[in-house]
Image (cartoon, rainbow, N blue to C red):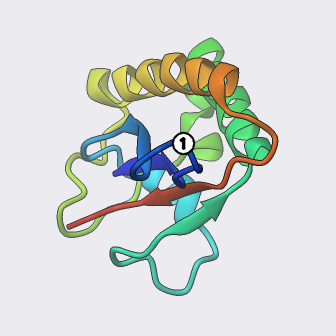
Amino acid sequence: MYLSRKARANEMEDVDLMYWRKANHIHRYFTEGVEEDNCTQIKVTEQDLVVLVDKCMDVLDRRDSAKELLPTQSGFFFGNVEYNDYYFSDIRDTLEGLSNVLKVIEPNDELYYYAWY
């Protein structure tokens, strides 16, 4: 699972900005409402990232809101669906990683989420 930026003129290839592994709740956030997400790129806006950061902060502040704000998703390759230490570790990692990403992206950047499985 990756968040990437499309290559700019001065870059040779696309740049991966963030990586997740089996964070099914993060996958669900990016793919909610998408008809097919199997190894396809999903365009992401800066606002999408800001909303996800806000949700992560809310979940960490009020753990009982996790099922409502960032629910897990079962499925092949998706790992655990419990709201346990792994879940909250993914939330912390997402919050930290996206906070850094939001500092380095530029207004015209093309951002994409994709999962390869």
Q: Is residue 55 left or right of residue 97?
A: right
Which amino acid type is shown beneath numbered disc 1? Asn
Q: How many marks?
A: 1
Q: Residue furthest front?
A: 10
Residue 67 on image: x %, y %: 55, 43
Instruction: Determine whether 63 is above or below 116 in the image.
Output: above
Q: Residue at x 81, y 40 (%)?
A: 107
Q: Residue at x 54, y 55 (%)?
A: 6
Q: Residue furthest bottom?
A: 35
Residue 40 on image: x %, y %: 42, 75
Residue 26 on image: x %, y %: 47, 46
Instruction: Determine whether 66 is above or below 31 in the image.
Output: above
Residue 71 on image: x %, y %: 51, 49
Pointer 1 residue: 10
Q: Residue at x 31, y 27 (%)?
A: 84
Towards the viewer: 73 or 20 = 20
Q: Is residue 48 left or right of residue 95?
A: right
Instruction: Determine whether 113 is above or below 103 in the image.
Output: below
Q: Residue at x 64, y 75 (%)?
A: 33
Towards the viewer: 12 or 94 = 12
Q: Residues within 10 Å of mark 1 (few under 14, many from 20)?
A: few
**Helix, strand or loop for disc 1:** loop
Location of the C terminus by quadrant is bottom left
Q: Is residue 6 left or right of residue 103?
A: left
| Residue 105: quarter of image | top right
